[in-house]
Image (cartoon, rainbow, N blue to C red):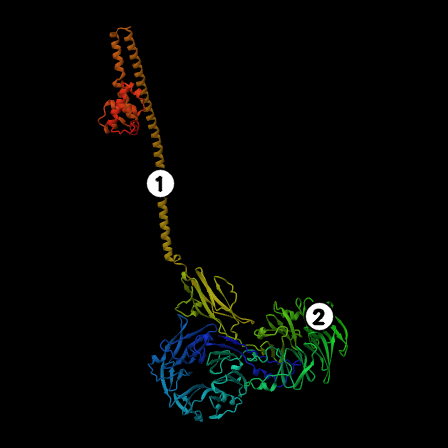
Amino acid sequence: MKQCVYITVFCIFLLSTVHAVAGIEKIENVCVPKITYFDKNVYNAANQTWAIAQNKKGYMYFANSAGLLEYDGSQWTTYYLPYNTSNVRSVAITDDQRIYTGQRNEFGYWTEDISTRKLKYTSLTQASNLHFADEEIWKIVPFHNSVYFHSFKNIYKYNTQTKSISIIPAPNRFQFLFCVNDRLFAQEKVLGLMELKDDRLVGVTGGEIFTGDCVYGMEAYSANSILIATIDKGLYMMENGRISKCNFPCNEFLIKNQIFSMISLPGGKFAFGTILNGLLITDHNGNMLSTINKPKGMPNNTVLSIFSDQTNNLWLGLDRGIAHIQLNSPIRTFPDPKGVLGSVYQAQEFNGRLYFATNQGLFSCAVADLSYPERELPLTLMPKSQGQVWALQVVGNKLLCAHNKGIYAVGGSKGDFIYAKSGASHLLKIDDNTVLFLTYDGLCVMHINGSRYTFKAQAVFPYDGSTLAKDRDNNIYVGSVSAGFCKVKFDSKFENVVSSSNQLTDIGINHATTRGIYSYNGNVFALDAVRGILKYDYTLNRFTPDPLINHLMPKKANIHRLQLDADRMWCYAADQFFCIKAYLTQKPTLEKRNMESLYKQLIKTYEDVEKISDGSYMVCTSNSFAVMNANYSPKTKQNMVYLRDIGTFTNVLKPLSLPNSLDYYTSHAIKFPYKHNTIFIRFTLPDYENEGNIRYSYRLKGNSENFSISSSSNIATFTNLPAGDYVFQVKATIVGTNEVYYSQELRITILPPWYMGWIGLCLFLLLVTGLAMLYYKYLQSRWQKEQKRIENEHEKEMAKMENRVLQEQVKSQIDELSRVTKSMLHKNKLMSKLDAEIAKLVLNRTIPSTELRGLKHIVEKNKNPDEEWKVFEMSFNKTHDNYLVKLSTQFPGLTTSDLKLAAYIRMNISSKEIAGLMNISSKSIEMARYRLRKKLNLSHEQNLTEFLMGL
């Protein structure tokens, strides 16, 4: 797991007079820079890394036991050879950015596959049909248009121009290969150090001393001299044709811990990786400057490889994992892995020793011990000092300590409590004989006379305070946010209080908003939550806002405490830590760049920074202390944000295969089908110094002209983009700085959906044409339906009219039939009456029967005339649709009498009336009905009238 080991080491040195004793500056030697450790679980490969390289973009490459590792500052990638799974032992990058690697029985180079943005491998051994006898390629050295691959048995020279490989066999065994001062050297196990000249091995004068397995490093010491590092014989110098033992101070350490790797650093320094004790950094003359090993925070003591990157920081290939050492860091921390010091509240040099006020007691070490970085710093706990120590103050020949139990005094090398009535938290030196201090019970005065101490509590402020300040008129300001603030005036000997007041409104102190009052050499400042920094104006006799300082304050700084020294005003806030340089002049400046990583480690309300030397300061922290170079200004970087990959995004990121490199698409668009309009873009800023503090934002012109909210994520995703042209760009910022870096622009086109292209247009035209035809047919059909409706309505009207005519005709026929029937009935009744009257006359014999016989004949004849029946029959058939014709046709056995009876029954005429019309008796009608039923084949249950009505 990746760990940022901020091993807090800030030279604790709280010189109140700021006069540093010779040697105190060397406290930096016992501190270490920022270390970032990458465990194998982070980069997902093997433990061991044998060689390291960097390309011009800043990406790092590691020859790892599992394969070739690539790290771009955001993502680790491992590349494997599918046909060779052995350890990658060596890596080197040439000017053409080819990445050469070597492993067992194999070497070749990697280049970027523009279609996938991944590395692809080209084997030089297979291309040249080389055959190995079990050889590991341990070293790769680019030299004069060639690349040399070193194994124990041979050196293979690959000519990059002719693409040919030549072999330089080892007389016995090649141990290592080095390029120094434009010369190529090889160490031969039996013959010693040799030089390759025109591909021939030439012995180096005096080189026979380096026989066996010994040379592990060669670096230029000057234009004419070379420093040679051996694993067990220390350092040698090759100069003016001679090789001699180097009597550097670091030699004993290196012989004891065995050199395994070596590199030169800027400023003539050297770094040595050892097998047993981590990393050693020396100056040009071999003086040890710093050691970084497991006790100082490095997870492993065996350094297999060292590489100095483009920013002059170190990468270490360890026996377990990879480490990045930020040599350029302005912060170096004191490693306290055992927690001996714990939280440091203040540090002070006194009588050749450094004293540390900690939460566990008063610790000290000899200043001379700072000159031995290879040793663990010996820290001693002062007798009886166990417990919380708040502050330190040198007074005369004594070091006074404000302790949780009282006042502890150090004289010479001994110490003891001189005051134990109450715990003390703050000290204010008036002179070498007088000290004011705050106890948990209030303000006290201490007078010192030789070895005698007298104490007097002051009733003017019987509270636990947090502020103790003095102006140039010896006015004392004491107080706290909770208890308020008082201005106290003592007599000239500081024995008695002359005056005191807690009503300070008239001098500009508002108890509700004032957070503290601070002083340095008579300059007094107050911290106000509303008005900012107030400075005491001796002319106006009041505190007034300092416009020059307040103008520099960051927005919403929320400062809770100040600390003043000769040149700087240190400002402590809840979420930041900065200073105002030259705060007493007319040109103050704000400084905060080198303090971002420390503010979370400060001890709130007890923050402390002290000057070591010009630009060098100690910062007390909750994890011991650190040394800060306030003048550090990083060199201008040529960094830029690089676009690493692009593709589509669904449930997983799917890279897009492209015919050209991403650089090509700064002026040409990458085209995405509309169905793949959810895309991702991966990017990175390879700035390893600021890892964890890089924030990315991006914009997609055409979608938004504004950059997104910054975050640490290095992947941008866009979902459901509409069809159109876009331009993508990334901006990277470094937290706490003004550094801004941009990527190149990337052009993207989301193609319209297929139905918006020419095929879609053709289909659209066809669809429109089809719809037009359908619409035409619809209109035609509608017109036809309308015409048909009109015709139907016309036909219905005609039918209605015809029906009305028919109804009228039927009605007329019915009326005619009814008239005929009534006429027949009436005539029949009349004839019956006449017949009855004739019968009466015959019975009465009024008139002779002979005379009546003619009249009777006329009556009988008119009772059933055939002409009337024919008229009735014709009228009946008209009215009832040829009813009698159909009836006679259906039942051919019916007689005329049967048809008459059926017609009369159909007209619903009563039997009596029918009897009269047919000139028969009622009984005869019943008989006739019976006969008709039989002829009609009616059953007994069937009704004759209903049957005839239903026909």
How far apart marks 1 and 2 lie (CA) works out to 103 Å
Q: Secondary structure at mark 1?
A: helix
Q: Amino acid at mark 1?
A: Lys
230 up-or-down from 323: above or below:
below
| Residue at 25% in and 15% down | 861
Q: Which numbered disc, 1 or 2, marks the residue that appears first in the sequence? A: 2
Q: Name the residue furthest left.
A: 893
Q: Name the residue furthest front.
A: 940
Viewer-closest of 227 and 712: 712
* Residue denoted by label 1: 785
- Crowding at mark 2 (Cα within 10 Å: few <14, some 14-19, many 20+): many
- How many numbered marks have been drawn onto this rendered protein structure? 2
* Residue denoted by label 2: 485
Q: Amino acid at mark 2?
A: Phe
- Crowding at mark 1 (Cα within 10 Å: few <14, some 14-19, many 20+): few
600 left or right, relative to 136: right
Is there CB contact under 8 Å for labels 1 and 2? Answer: no
Q: Residue 621 location in percent, x, y?
A: 59, 76
Quarter of image, res 77: bottom left
**Res. 201 visible in picture:** yes
Q: Secondary structure at mark 2?
A: strand
Viewer-closest of 473 and 268: 473
Quarter of image, res 195: bottom left
